[in-house]
Image (cartoon, rainbow, N blue to C red):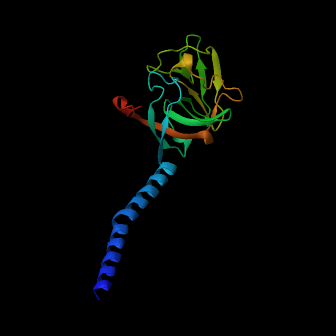
Amino acid sequence: MENQIQNSVEKSKSKQFLLDWILPITAAIILALLINKYVFFNIKVPTSSMYPTIMEGDRLMVTKVYKPEKLEREDLVVFTIPENKDRLIKRLIGKPGDVVEIAQDGKVSVNGESLDESYVKNPGGIAGRTYTVPEDSYFVLGDNRSNSLDSRYWNQSSFVKGEDIIGKARFTIYPFNRIGGV
């Protein structure tokens, strides 16, 4: 009889351990994986093309984008391009139907209106060109214009397809002294 009671107590402890630890940990892991796949993810900035807004090596929290048409001009977007399957991050400048003009002095205007780009410290690179953004495409530039491979340089197309935009950068999460919105 005493042996049966002891076995019953051990089974009860095992069930309690399972309920108290294993199930919550498993549920948390599954929830984290689902959030990472469908809601947001983090990305390490691969180059200095967005300096001084974000630095090479910064880690950013990025929300998934399911409707690129809801993006706003000057949002920081994460995307891939056919020439390079790495995730890149640039500033969205032109939306479908926009006419983007880069003057000889590097100043950018969209549909005839000059952009106030206080975030640009090095306006160099290709200038003196006009781009008309096709439907379901976007024109992107790095903030560090003299050190950014962006829509001005890509071989096959100067534009990012809407389907290739995977997220919008929201916050710097690392290094800790740079935590904050982007």
Q: Quadrant of residue 22?
A: bottom left
> Where residue 93 sits in the image (x, y, percent)?
54, 28
The quadrant the N terminus occupies is bottom left
**Left or right: 137 in relation to 14:** right
Q: Is residue 62 above or below residue 13?
A: above
Residue at 48% in and 53% down: 33
- Image quadrant in which you'd find residue 145: top right
Seen from the viewer's position, the closer of residues 125 and 115 is 125
Q: Position of residue 79 (x, y in %)?
A: 57, 36
Q: Give the residue drawn at x 54%, y 24%.
A: 142
- Number of disc labels: 0
Q: Is residue 52 left or right of residue 16?
A: right
Return the x and y of residue 62 as percentages of the image width and height: 47, 40
Q: Position of residue 46 (x, y in %)?
A: 53, 29
Residue extending furthest toward the top:
105
Outermost residue toward the bottom?
Answer: 1
Say above or below: 58 vs 4: above
Horizontally, residue 12 falls left or right of residue 38, namely left
Residue 88 left/right relative to 18: right
Q: Please identify the residue farthest to the left as the structure is shown.
A: 2
Is 2 placed above or below 118 here? below
Give the camera-side residue of 43 and 126. 43
For residue 112, what is the image quadrant? top right
Q: Where, quadrant-wise, is the C terminus in this rendering? A: top left
Residue 113 vs residue 72, the one in the foreground: 72
- At horizontal 64% and vertical 20% (from top left) the residue drawn is 130
